[in-house]
Image (cartoon, grey):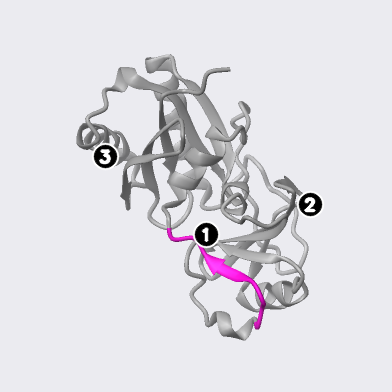
Amino acid sequence: MISPTIILAVETAVGGGSISVLRSQGTVLGQLADVSRAEDLLTEIARLLADCKVSRDQIEMIAVSLGPGSFTGIRIGIATALGLMSSLGAKCVGVNALEAVSMSCPNESATAVLPVGRGYFAFQDFRHAEPAGQPEVVNEEELIQALKSRSDVSIVFGSEPGFASAQLKLPESFVVTERLSTLIGRCAVMGGGTKEMKPLYFRYQGVRRTSSDRGSG
């Protein structure tokens, strides 16, 4: 199967959001941050495409984050991606942002971590690039305790965790420096993601193990 030539990646669920334009080999043509406002997103996408000298008709795949993160942000990203898919006739792929973060790790075992706002974090275990558990949402103290019990795996932070990582005393942990939208796009190029646009929203319940609360917010 021939890979799409141009991929537009959209992430509006974590932090200020970001968008990226990539080639099928994963090469980044351009990216923008702080783009999660619904009323500005299409304008920012048009600006990025112009900066990359890419026309809308050249987009063959749209990769969008399904979460975890802000449910409002997730909905904005999915709605925008589906609208563009309809108008452009492009393929649309939804990506678990934690899966995209985990694929930045060269090792077979990894735990991906993302801040989801208000002092909470989502994390998920992966083995051989496949999920080895369900995503969980925890506070900072719970996250530190959970990661300390994972001393035999690599810990991959999708962005700066906001606390002193030295507390963890882990042999292998690192922060991904690329935009999350770029990771989303690369994950889709490598065959990750799904055609089902179901939000991955997880509500903090004040306990270590949480259950997904999809479709509510």
Mark 3: amino acid? Glu
Task: Magenta stretch: give its range.
Answer: 169-177
Q: Position of residue 64 (x, y in %)?
A: 49, 37
* Camera-nearest residue between 154 and 63: 154
Q: From the image, tell me which residue sits under label 3.
A: 44
Residue found at x 69% / y 59%: 110
Q: From the image, tell me which residue sits under label 1.
A: 158
Relative horizontal placement of residue 177, taking residue 40 as reference (left or right): right
Element class at badge 3? helix
Q: Point out the frontmost of discs 2 and 3.
A: 2
**Which quadrant does the N terminus fall into?**
top right
Q: From the image, tell me which residue sits under label 2.
A: 132
Badge 2 crowding class, 10 Å Cα cut-off, few under 14, some 14 to 19, many 20 or more, is: some
- Secondary structure that dominates the magenta span: loop
Q: Position of residue 26 (x, y in %)?
A: 45, 38
Q: Give the Cα separation between the discs numbered 1 and 2.
A: 18 Å
Q: Quadrant of residue 11?
A: top left
Mark 1: amino acid? Gly
Relative horizontal placement of residue 114, taking residue 150 as reference (left or right): left
Residue found at x 46% / y 51%: 180
